[in-house]
Amino acid sequence: MNFTFDTAPNIIFRSGATKELGEYVKPRMQRPVLLTDKGLIDAGLIEPALQSLEAAGLNILLFDDVAADPPAGKVKEAVATARAHNADGVIALGGGSSMDTAKVVSVLMHSSQTLEEIYGTNMVSGARAPLVLLPTTAGTGSEVTSISVITTEDDQKVAVVDNALYPDLAILDASLTLGLPRHVTAATGIDAMVHAIEAYTNNTRKNPLSDTFARKALRLLSTNIVAACETPGDTKAREAMLLGAMLAGQAFANSPVGAVHGMAYPLGGIFHIPHGLSNSLMLEPVLRFNAPKAAHLYAELADVIAPGQTGDDAQRYDAFIRRIVEIVTATGVERRLSQLGISHNDLPRMAEDAMKAQRVLQNNPREVTYDDALAMYTEVL
């Protein structure tokens, strides 16, 4: 068996670690740009990080205009801002959008390459600036992946995939996720579960390490997501979710995602539905679609989220699906596209756009055609 497994070289997992951010960052950079979004500014989550950075004597520029599903124009603005500051490093504190933006800024701010020139796999040339990532949601796992997903000017989701995007340091501080609203906790948590499930069922790069990380991630996430939703201040549940999301990120960074993501991308690109919620909506129909090819793998995952199941693969697969539906329903997220303003007339364009996501569809255990995509969208309309 041949495989490779890459991840971030340094990870700190400790509640309260943000208060010492300056000491972690100072050996790496002196003039950092800190990327975040206005929602986190308003929530006061940035203050401990800023205070620590200032106490360390660093010359910080705050860029707080990160947008969801990072639009290419906003990413270019962040690159220009970093260059104007003569920044020597990048810090992101936020969700996947902030971290994905920061990754691209770190490779472009000292480079002659354009954003469009690095779309794709292994297209980054030259060295990137030092990069430190702090997630504020337990979902994307972006802090330990080599992927950044950008929304182009024509509403297409494209990826930059390159080992240069792994950060120098990932700091996971569960205190940053305490009090996260229920709908965000639910959507991002289900997103992380999707990462684990799709990494485990990848048909091209599945490997023993990614399997191990995916199973551990799915156990942590499935047993803690409802508690995290219902009791926002439950520190143990929040820590378990953050660890699970990171492990899922490490799994899918090496055994990439499949059709759930491919089907979710048009929801974010066209309708700006949050990525986690998009994945949540498409999870059940894709699992059912994949069953003819992957029932045995889903049966193995039933042992993780619904232990004690007996019977053949089909019976254990049914138990797996039932448990997934129970968890998703218990979190309270929307279950139908129509709840989000999507109509039957929108489905053909969505199916067309989904077909453009071959980067991830090629990893799916079952081939997805336009008609398949249209049928799955119709199933959850």
Image (cartoon, rainbow, N blue to C red):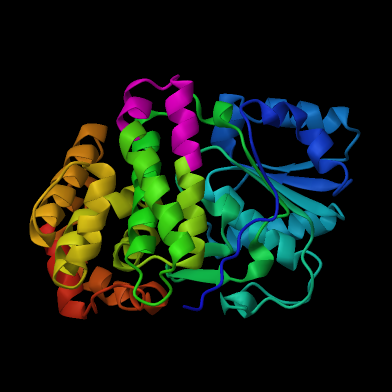
Q: Is residue 224 left or right of residue 11?
A: left
Please give the count of numbered marks on the rendered protein.
0
Residue range of the region highlighted in magenta in the rendering: 225-243
Q: Say which quadrant the C terminus sits in.
A: bottom left
Task: State the image quarter where residue 255 is shown.
Answer: bottom left
Is residue 183 visible in the rendered image? The answer is no
Q: Nearer the viewer, residue 303 or 260?
A: 303
Residue in the image at 41% along x and 59% along y: 211
Residue 8 appears at what percent x and percent y? 65, 56
Say whether residue 237 is magenta. yes
Q: Is residue 15 shown left or right of residue 281?
A: right
Q: Nearer the viewer, residue 339 or 136?
A: 136
User: Residue 321, how many percent across, how many down?
Assistant: 16, 51
Check the image and report above or below for 285 versus 117.
above
Q: Residue at x 79, y 70 (%)?
A: 127
Quadrant assignment, res 258:
bottom left
Residue 270, horizontal then vertical, whole percent? 35, 62
Query: Is the stretch drawn in magenta largely helix, strand or loop?
Result: helix
Quarter assignment of residue 343: bottom left
Q: Residue at x 73, y 67 (%)?
A: 108
Above or below: residue 202 compared with residue 329: below
Q: Say left or right for 87 vs 107.
A: right
Residue shown at 32% from the left, 54% from the top: 279
How far across and how far down the image is residue 299, in percent? Answer: 20, 57
Specify whether residue 303 is in view: yes
